[in-house]
Amino acid sequence: MYKIQANQSGTRSIEVSDAHLQTIKKYHLFKNLVDSNGIVDEETLDKLKFNVRSLLEGNTETNKELLDLCLDVIYNNNMKALGLHNLALLYADWNAKIQVEDTNSSDID
């Protein structure tokens, strides 16, 4: 379990699990999310929320992983632009670590 800082003062945080990060990866939720300026703001958070809502509405099956991500992280009352920025940084670090582990395990085989 990881914690991301959700506000500037550090008084609010959001817990993020490996399952949440795996769901972000599975649905490519961060792909093309941030504009070329690289700034994560409230509009970026709204874009993510609209994308996730679209995925949920377009899918006839109930997807527990995506719903859990929404309830626990994306639609968390503490989630603001800074929280999304920190979530993206956490995801990038986590994904890089996963890539290295996958490479190391394939070297052993």
Image (spheres, grey):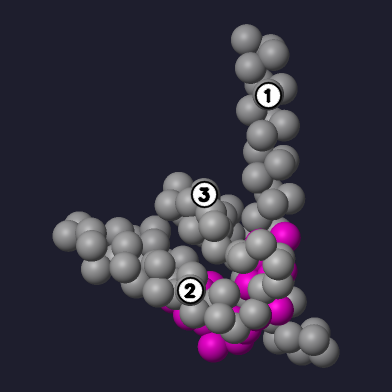
Contact? badges 1 and 2 (CB < 8 Å): no
| Residue 67: image location, x then y, percent | 37, 67
Secondary structure character of the magenta stretch overall: helix
Up-down relation of residue 86 to residue 79 (above or below): above
- Residue 80 is a magenta residue: yes
Disc 2 and disc 3 in contact, CB within 8 angstroms: no
| Residue type beneath disc 1 | Thr
Report crowding for label 2: few under 14, some 14 to 19, many 20 or more residues within 10 A (C-alpha): some
Q: Residue furthest right?
A: 9
Q: Position of residue 60 (x, y in %)?
A: 17, 60
Visible in this render: residue 50?
yes
* Residue range (magenta): 71-89
Callout 1 secondary element:
helix
Residue 88, percent from left and from top: 66, 62
Return the residue at label 3: 25
Residue closest to the eye, 35 or 29: 35
Check disc 2 and report its element: helix, strand or loop: helix
Amino acid marked by disc 2: Lys
Q: In the picture, residue 39 is in which quadrant?
A: bottom right
**Residue at the image position 49 percent from the left and 70 percent from the top:** 48
Kindly identify which numbered label has been placed on residue 103: 1
**Residue at (73% x, 86% y) in the render:** 7
How far apart in space, not on screen, are marks 1 and 2 (Cα)? 33 Å
Residue 19 visible here:
no
Q: Which mark is residue 74?
A: none
Up/down of 71 relative to 105, above or below: below
| Residue highlighted by disc 2 | 47
Frontmost residue, 85 versus 35: 35
